[in-house]
Amino acid sequence: MSKLLSNLFEHSVEMNTLIQSIQENISPILIHGSEHTVVKWVAERVAAVNNRNVILFFEDEHKAKLAAEEMEDAIFLPAREMVWFDSYAHSNQVAIERVEALIEMMNTKQVIVCASVQNLSYRYPKKKMDRLNIDMQSEISMKTLQDKLFEFGYERVEIVESKGQYSIRGGIFDIFSTMHESPYRIELFGDEIDSIRAFDIETQKSLSKYTQFSIFPCREILLDSQHIERAIEKLESLKSKYKQTKRQKIDEIIEHLHEKIYVDGVDKYFPLFFEQSDLLLDYLDNPVVFFMGNNQCVSRLKSYYEDYKRQFTDYFERGEVIAEQFDRIYDFEAIRNALSLNQIVVSEMLMKHTDGFVPQQIIKLSSREMNKYYGKFDQIALDIRKWKLKGYHILIAFSNKERLERFLQTMESLEVTINSEQDFERVMSGQAIALYHPIQSGFYFDTFKAVVLTETELFGEGKKISRKKVAQGKVIKAFSELAVGDYVVHESHGIAQYLGVEQMKIDQTRKDFLKLRYAQDDYLYIPVESAGLVQKYMGTDKEKLKLNRLGGTEWKKTKSRAKKLIDDMTDELIELYAARRTRRGYAFSSDNEWQREFEALFPYQETRDQLKCIDEIKMDMEKPEPMERLLCGDVGYGKTEVALRAAFKAVMDSKQVAILVPTTILAQQHFNNMVERFSKYPANIQMISRFKTKAEQTKIIKDIKAGIVDVVVGTHRLLSNDVVFKDLGLLVIDEEQRFGVKHKEKIKLMKENIDVLTLTATPIPRTLHMSMIGIRDMSVIEDPP
């Protein structure tokens, strides 16, 4: 897809002029007339045609990250966290992402890098490719391996859960290295490598076997013996400049360096570790440097340096830093001098003065934004036909494959031919290609007849892109997800309160334990590796929650009572749901054009689970038997949108929909969502709650009976005897467990032969059990949006 976009510019005279100028080493070059969203594709073509490294600098992180996500093979380099204090507990995710980006830059022959401009300010260690290669023929002692892991910045833990961690159990090393998607387990027999296996981070079970494995650094500063000795020597010589409290801190750092304990925030001592440093540009061979919004970038560089100086001065005056620590970044003049050795392209939308650089060539590349269609497919089809007749090159990009398929079906029904094959290298004149690739906005070039459309232009708002590298796991994946004070349920001992993690010494070994408080201030300590025995308490009325007694019979009695209640209800429920299975319900029609359009106008990218659940519900609705489905997903995971699509499907077949909720506030929220989503369609949506006057309620009830109301949202008021539907086809129940016994009896009567969809974040055991044994079907949304 990226190649298709960059190849659009091969028809541009201006683009060919730029490429020629770069080949002739002209610098700086000013491009004006196009938004930065367009210039990044220009940069990609420059990289491809000239076989050059390209780095794009943006004024902020967000723009850089978005550009990298849109460009298929681009590397995003996050900004460094500049701290002036010692930290032993903050997340090292950003540091690891930076190191992985830098390794990829050094390891790849030709790259495109997207970064915020402040990355130009930092001093970097001299460019060097470090790694430790281990294979089945290697010999390495436990001490050597452990020393190397310290040098590379790895943290020793009990259980490996994320990149940059390692653990030791006997002769077994678990290591989660940067540049790898899974952690590896290395088993030593003496100094010999006995086995190398990847393992699952959730279950900790071994997976595939390997014959070799490379360990990469997870920090920019590598603490080898040479650098440690230099840092300790400098720190010792500088202690006299600090106040007593700061000298104690320096002694602590020195002690950690002696003991080989890595300290987060150690990069604030960068000038003490390294006599020489590099610029980011030194990590790339002969790069073309693009400034995306030159004046904003230069302004950001200057203000960043001034902010850094003010911050340093503040810490210096408080006696918390020394003068030798200042040289962690470059000033603007030093950066400009270094940039003069590289080829520079500056981009501005308007032709104006460029701060910091005097252009040697000016190229106008005029593009304009596309108008928005807001889902008007007839107009989209009309314009595509017109462009094809005029010989335009038309590219249509989608960030969602299902939306792409629906669009192609719609265009086919409107007799517009659009190619969707994945192996095109270029768009031919008079051709339209639609492909899956996340791009936020399109553009239009009249000079060389190119059009790029995205969901932003087609529907008024693009899908929100969310890239995930790691698959989602269970609700509680690690004890670190529990907060102190949370209520938990132990499989054998019942309800307790979580008080955090305590370290205890057992058999000369220190181990972490979960501390649980029970009634009468009894305590239970659970080894962290047995955290799976503990689940977070998911009930509602936590104020009245009573802790169980350790060793008491209360928890056993509670489980026995629950089991007896389930047994008592079984016959009644089986009879009810067996009767529903034998009755004929209404078989809804397949999706029509309006249904596809309604779904296409959803402004967010559906998750995989959402789409699966939608398909399951639609299949149920199209069957002649009444649907009985439980939709389970956490708050904010997109259950409402799934329900709205089911409701729209029912309305398309002239059936009424009732949405039953436990609270007035929730009723108002659902009503507002439905009014917004259904705004383009002739559906009558009403709400019954205490927010409505008696006269308004009477009118709505009358319209429900007459069939004038298509969808009604309401609290238990919907269950009153005076509410009679003309042709109810779908009942949606939100959080059924929060309704009382009498309300549930009335719900049973409503369910006789209509489709029922129940939404819940926390299914009660009865409801969940019915789904598990097949009385109720269940759909689950596990992935967050």
Image (cartoon, helix red, strand yellow):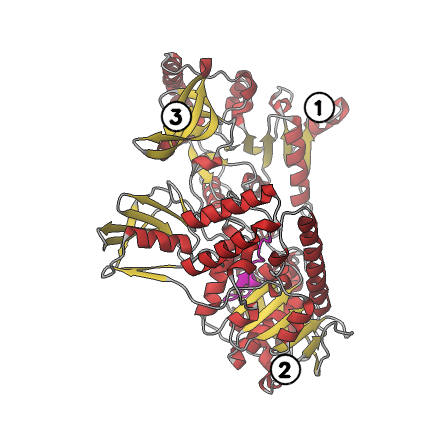
Look at the image and tell me whether residue 591 can be seen: no
Magenta-span inclusion, residue 461 = no
Which residue is nearer to you in this view: 605 or 756? 605
Give the residue displayed 68% in from the left and 28% down from the top.
688
Residue 599 in the figure: left or right of residue 700: left
Q: Is residue 680 above or below residue 336?
A: above
Q: Position of residue 563 (x, y in %)?
A: 37, 18
Q: Which mark is residue 525?
A: 3
Q: SS at mark 2?
A: helix
Residue marked by disc 2: 18
The answer to which quarter of the image holds residue 180 is: bottom left
Which residue is nearer to you in this view: 741 or 500? 500
Q: Earlier in the sequence, mark 1 or mark 3?
A: 3
Q: Which residues are magenta?
A: 67-82
Please say if the residues under marks 1 and 3 sit with CB atoms less than 8 Å apart. no
The amino acid type, in three-letter code, at marker 2 is Leu
Q: Which mark is residue 690?
A: 1
